[in-house]
Image (cartoon, grey):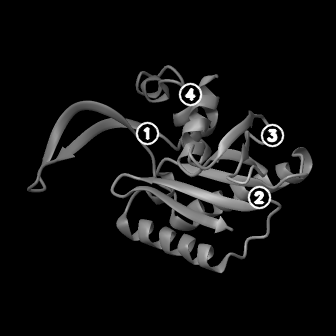
């Protein structure tokens, strides 16, 4: 199994337990064919959420941070978005402590921009579902976020989670997918599971 498939399998098992769902086939479109407890097959498409293409590049380009710091490489779309500078640490009393470390800074997107990025992920996958998947069986969409969606200030985190929980309760998303599941890695609370469509 290649690295991408290994990562997808880890994400898959965060929602579809090995005890209840056996893998019938590792696929490409969708990523996995599973069978439920009654042996009914269904597909699962796995995708990752990134708040911006820049976040995706941090995840997908090996050693991108080090390359930026060493002025070796910057993707053309990141010019003007990312800034390399000295990291300033603050102690418990609020005093700045100069640090010899260098880091990469960027402005975090606002709540509405993050929600729109999520909507774009769903819209793109909806198009792919209609055009490329065998729709003879139900297919679920599993969206995985390592924390981009709720990163930053507590007020943003609360706004975004409130919006997502309202969407979960309303269950009004129109999609060819049977279910749309959002998994968010929260450093304080573990994996948050939200059914955007059930």
Which picture quadrant has residue 138? Answer: bottom right
* Mark 4 vs mark 1, CA separation in Å: 17 Å
**Relative to the observer, which residue lies in front, 77 or 32?**
32
**Mark 1 — residue?**
83
Q: Viewed as shown, does residue 157 lie left or right of 9? A: left
- Are there few (<14), some (14-19), or many (20+) residues within 10 Å of tag 2? some
Q: Is any part of residue 79 visible from this angle?
A: no
Q: Is any part of residue 189 visible from this angle?
A: yes
* Mark 1 vs mark 2, CA separation in Å: 31 Å
Q: Nearer the viewer, mark 1 or mark 2?
A: 2
Q: Is residue 143 above or below residue 166?
A: above
Which image quarter is the N terminus in? top right
The secondary structure type at the circle numbered 3 is: loop
* Mark 2 vs mark 4, CA separation in Å: 25 Å
Labels 4 and 3 touching (C-beta < 8 A): no
Percent x, y of residue 57? 57, 35
**Mark 4 — residue?**
61
The secondary structure type at the circle numbered 4 is: loop
* Mark 4 vs mark 3, CA separation in Å: 24 Å
């Amino acid at each position: 199994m290649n690295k991408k498939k290994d990562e997808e399998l880890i994400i898959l098992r965060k929602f579809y337990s090995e005890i209840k769902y056996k893998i019938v086939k590792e696929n490409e479109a969708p990523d996995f064919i599973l069978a439920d407890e009654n042996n009914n097959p269904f597909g699962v498409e796995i995708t990752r959420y990134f708040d911006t293409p820049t976040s995706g590049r941090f995840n997908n380009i090996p050693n991108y941070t080090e390359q930026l710091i060493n002025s070796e490489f910057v993707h053309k779309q990141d010019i003007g978005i990312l800034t390399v500078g000295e990291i300033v640490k603050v102690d418990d009393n609020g005093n700045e402590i100069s640090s010899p470390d260098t880091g990469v800074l960027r402005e975090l997107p606002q709540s509405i921009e993050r929600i729109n990025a999520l909507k774009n992920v769903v819209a793109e996958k909806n198009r792919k579902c209609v055009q490329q998947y065998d729709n003879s069986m139900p297919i679920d969409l599993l969206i995985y976020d390592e924390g981009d969606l709720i990163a930053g200030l507590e007020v943003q985190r609360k706004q975004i989670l409130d919006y997502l929980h309202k969407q979960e309760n309303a269950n009004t998303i129109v999609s060819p997918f049977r279910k749309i599941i959002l998994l968010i890695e929260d450093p304080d609370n573990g994996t948050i599971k939200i059914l955007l469509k059930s």
